[in-house]
Image (cartoon, helix red, strand yellow):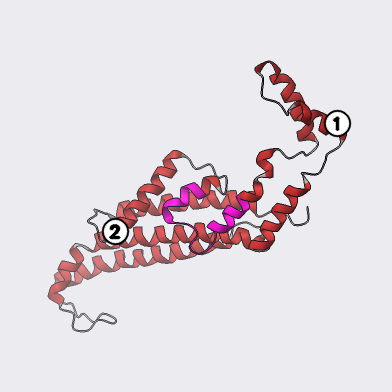
Amino acid sequence: MIAHSRAYEALRRESQDFLDFVVLVCTAVPGLRTTLAAGTATISPDHFKGVQVSDLPRYIGRYQDQIARACIVTLYSFFEAYVKAVLAEVVTFHGGEEEFVRVAERRARRFLKMPPPDVVAAKRKLQEQAKKSKVEKYKKHSAVLVNAGYRFPTELLASLGVKTLVRRARPKGMRAAEIPLVLEEALNFSLEKTASDRLKAINDLRNAIAHGRPTKSSLKKALAVSGDLRSIAAKVDAHVVEHFFVLEGYA
């Protein structure tokens, strides 16, 4: 059985590598501050020659804001990449775009064939404008159809959903702002309003930073972003593995 998608494993690895770098910076800068205060610093940074020791206190003064901004941009980009990658992984799992769509269309057509007489009789009772006085009868006839494996109209439209997912999984098939919509409508993932609002707020913040608009960030805020994205991604991946990594071509 598949425990996690490959997309999720990549997200965890890349996010942890970046956070390890953040830990390194947050460890190194206080040590540098102490060294500078002692007046014994001999500075020789990698790749940057001619750095003036006198400039370093000014850099140190704003390093947390800069690392926080980098965290928000980087970690949300990783999350966005994860969502796109897991959609593509679902498509690949089912044989690729053409095969995935073919199976969905084939199954829909198969369920359009005339069912047994008892199922047809029950279906006929449901082929009228709904009447409140017949609710219990509708439930009884619906149960007959459900027990027989009959596919209702919404299920027959599933192939359209597959085609939509396939389009979204393409490299430029989805914008970051559409992630909540895709999670809910393409993957049927129950995204709570608080989580949806949080994703929108993080995306807006990421865009503001990336486009050079003035923003106030802190390392505490950035680490909260990291935790929230990690939590949402874990829930999404558990949902995808449970419901979408199921072989269907043999049914």
Q: Is residue 88 above or below residue 44?
A: above
Q: Position of residue 143 (x, y in %)?
A: 76, 29
Q: Position of residue 105 (x, y in %)?
A: 71, 53
Q: Is residue 174 above or below residue 117?
A: below
Between residues 196 and 29, which one lies in front from this camera angle? 196
Q: In the image, is 156 to the left or to the right of 80?
A: right
The image quarter containing residue 176 is bottom left
- What residue does disc 2 label? 209
Q: Residues within 10 Å of mark 2 (few under 14, many from 20)?
A: some
* Residue range (magenta): 161-182
Q: Is residue 172 magenta?
A: yes
Q: Is residue 241 above or below residue 116?
A: below
The extreme front residue here reads 128
Amino acid type at mark 1? Asp
The residue shown at (17%, 71%) is 56
- What residue does disc 1 label? 118
Between residues 71 and 203, which one lies in front from this camera angle? 203
